[in-house]
Image (cartoon, rainbow, N blue to C red):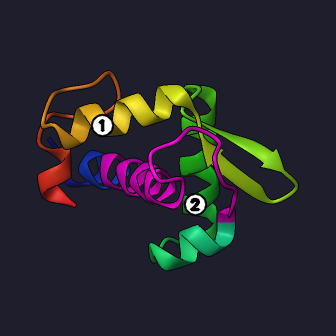
């Protein structure tokens, strides 16, 4: 896999895993400020928005209030599958080991 694609997968998984942690693995349990999460993950605003937009289009995350995002049930399942080192439609099987 080329480095650019690897970085894209990494950004997506890190954002998803962070939302999973914030929500204690429960879909839409808590909201989080999109840009604060991006900043914590050391992602720029544009990368944060692009990453979120992709994940939202896939139904893995969603807006729950102005500026606040959360993980969906589909997102919870995707993170748990990846953490179990199984391939998902969104992440390679070894993504949890790489980030």
98 above or below 63?
below
Q: CA distance from mark 1 to mark 2?
A: 22 Å
Q: Disc 2 marks which residue? A: 48
The answer to whether 77 appears left or right of 85 in the picture is right
Q: Residue at x 53, y 28 (%)?
A: 73
**Local crowd size for mark 2, using a 10 Å CA cut-off: few (<14), some (14–19), many (≥20):** many
Magenta-colored stretch includes residue 7: no
| Residue 28 rendering spot, x and y as whole percentages | 65, 42
51 above or below 57?
below
The answer to whether 79 appears left or right of 99 in the picture is right
The residue at the far right in this view is 66
**Local crowd size for mark 1, using a 10 Å CA cut-off: few (<14), some (14–19), many (≥20):** some
Q: Residue at x 69, y 51 (%)?
A: 69
Q: Are marks 1 and 2 in contact (CB under 8 Å)?
A: no
Viewer-nearest residue: 75 or 14? 75
Viewer-nearest residue: 64 or 58? 64
Report the span colored magenta.
9-34
| Residue 33 rendering spot, x and y as whole percentages | 70, 66
Viewer-nearest residue: 84 or 37? 84
Dividing the image into 4 quarters, which one contains the N terminus? top left
Magenta-colored stretch includes residue 23: yes
Quarter of the view holding residue 99: bottom left
Q: Disc 1 marks which residue? A: 80
Q: Residue at x 36, y 31 (%)?
A: 78
Q: Secondary structure at mark 2?
A: helix
Quarter of the view holding residue 54: top right
| Residue 95 rendering spot, x and y as whole percentages | 19, 46
């Amino acid at each position: 896999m080329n480095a650019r694609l690897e970085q894209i997968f990494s950004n997506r998984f890190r954002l998803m895993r962070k939302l999973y942690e914030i929500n204690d693995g429960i879909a839409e349990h808590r909201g989080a400020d999109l840009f604060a999460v991006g900043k914590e993950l050391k992602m720029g605003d544009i990368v944060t928005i692009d990453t979120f937009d992709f994940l939202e289009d896939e139904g893995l995350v969603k807006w729950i209030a102005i500026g606040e995002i959360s993980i969906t049930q589909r997102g919870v399942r995707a993170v748990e599958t990846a953490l179990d080192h199984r391939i998902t439609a969104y992440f390679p099987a070894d993504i949890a080991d790489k980030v």
